[in-house]
Image: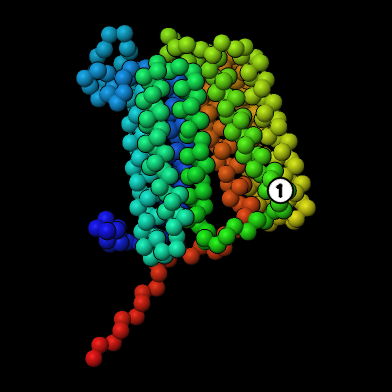
Amino acid sequence: MPFTSLVARLPFPSAAVQRAVGVAAVLAQALIGVTGSIVRVTGSGLGCPTWPQCVAGSLVPVNHPGIHALNQWIEFGNRLLTGVVIVVAAVAVVTAWRVQIDHPRRTRLVKLAWTMPGGVVLQAVVGGMTVLAKLEWWTVAIHFLATTPLVWLAVLLLRAFREGDEPARPLVPASGRAILVALAVVLWLVLAAGTTVTGAGPHSGDINTHRLDAPVEALAQVHGGLLVLYLLLLAIFGLQLLRVGAPKSLWQRYTAVWVVAVAQGVLGSLQYALGVPEAMVSFHVLGAMALIIATATLWTGSRDRGPAVSLEPAPKQPELATT
């Protein structure tokens, strides 16, 4: 393939470059979720009321009756950030592809890399549907929840750059893996419940948007209760680590999850007590992204796929002597 030969001419990405690309993918996917919350709490969700154009006849903000210029630029800035995320995703694909050219068995790495641009395209479509639906609360919820697996996959990609492709060897017993699966499922339920609280809460993204007709207090209790269940499962998983004498690296990841989860719980409680101020909403979303990253990091640290085999270019084959 012509493009393969073009990629093959690129310098082999060093271990530092591979790690930087993986970190950039994680940060880009998480950041777009946070900036989306800024759009919502500033009431800028319909600052660009059409899609893919900002306003009818223009891709960029222009004077428009009934739409404040600041709201236009906040929403348009979020759209521009999507372009940055696409660039990072493309770099991840090219980096993984270049690695595979030297190490053909690294197909899993390339597949993970391709989820980045694929996910961004899907998110762009969902975002367009959200705008065209005038920010109906359930479309906003889907738009946010669609980001969460992309952040998780970006963490897997970062890890894949630093590990081999051997069959996963669990570092915890089967019961521990089952608890970890349950932990991931409950985390997603916590996030989904959080979107219902947002759907019924005061920050809709636009003053004319329909809200979820349900008591915020009850929804917040469900959201908080699921977080308590998450913490309970996390404590049980810790007992599993004690039982098997888990390595120090896994304990460090486990501790990081506790720190982020407790901080997120405290922040959510304080946010609710203070009447959901705008700035704290975005910090809470940032905390949600950090919790996804921490949990995914714990997930990847609970198994071993062997040593990294592609941090250096493949040895050059000796040229055959000619007569």
Q: Residue furthest bottom?
A: 323
Q: Which quarter of the figure has residue 96?
A: bottom left
Residue 226 percent coordinates (x, y) = 67, 28
Q: Which residue lies furthest to the left in this view?
A: 57
Q: Is residue 13 above or below residue 75?
A: below
Q: Check disc 1 and report its element: helix, strand or loop.
A: helix
Image mark count: 1
Tell me which amino acid carries mark 1: Gly
Residue 106 visible in this rendered orientation of the protein: yes
Q: Residue at x 68, y 34 (%)?
A: 230
Q: Which quarter of the figure has residue 126?
A: top left
Q: Residue at x 43, y 18 (%)?
A: 135
Residue 72 visible in this rendered orientation of the protein: no
Q: Which residue is drawn at 39% across and 37% down?
A: 120
Residue 229 percent coordinates (x, y) = 71, 32
Question: Which residue was labeled with disc 1?
Answer: 176
Residue 12 percent coordinates (x, y) = 36, 62
Relative to 143, 74 lies left or right: left
| Figure quadrant of the N terminus | bottom left
Q: Residue at x 50, y 44 (%)?
A: 153
Relative to 70, 205 lies left or right: right
Judge the density around disc 1: few (<14), some (14-19), many (≥20) Cα neighbours within 10 Å. many
Q: Is residue 316 above or below residue 221?
A: below
Q: Is residue 135 above or below residue 185?
A: above
| Figure quadrant of the C terminus | bottom left
